[in-house]
Amino acid sequence: LAQNKATVDGVTARMDLAAQAFTNHSTPDSVHEAFHTLRHALHMRQGPWTDEEATRVRAILEMAARDIVGGKGQA
C-alpha cells in the first residue's frame, strides 16, 4: 500500500468528490447543456493543436473551474 500511496490518495480524493456530488443538490439542466456545448466545441475544433493553443484553452478551462468552485463572478 505504501508503494502505491500516490495512486491510493488519488482514488480516495476522487471518491470524496463523488460522495460530495451525490450529497449536494443536482446540477441544473442549463449547466449540463453548457457543459455539453463545451465538450462539443472541443471535439469539433478544426486544425492541429499547437502548444500555444493548448495552453490558452487549458488556462480558460482551469479559470472556469476555479470560478465555479469558488462561486465567484456573475454571468
Image (tube, rainbow, N blue to C red):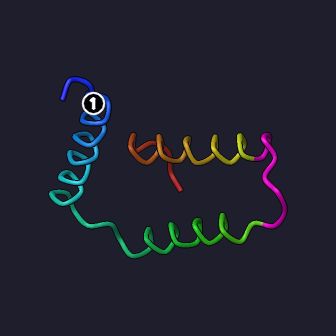
Give residue 6's quadrant in the image: top left
Q: Quadrant of residue 26?
A: bottom left
Residue 27 in the figure: left or right of residue 52: left
Pick the front one: 21 or 11: 11
The three-letter amino acid code for the residue at tag 1 is Asn
Q: Residue furthest right?
A: 47
Q: Position of residue 23 (x, y in %)?
A: 15, 57
The secondary structure that most of the magenta stretch takes on is: loop
Left or right side of 18 for 57: right
Point out the image quarter for the N terminus. Answer: top left
Q: Could you tell me which residue is drawn at 26 percent across and 33 percent down?
A: 9
Q: x, y (%) of residue 75? A: 53, 56
Residue 47 magenta: yes
What span is in magenta? Answer: 46-53
Residue 27 to residue 18: above or below: below
The picture places residue 73, in percent across and down from the top left corner, at 50, 45
Q: Residue at x 82, y 57 (%)?
A: 48
Q: Nearer the viewer, residue 20 or 47?
A: 47
Q: Residue at x 18, y 53 (%)?
A: 19
Task: Please check the rendered image and state whether residue 58 is part of the magenta-colored stretch, yes or no.
Answer: no
Disc 1 designates what residue? 4
Local SS, label 1: helix
Residue for point 26% across, 40% down: 13
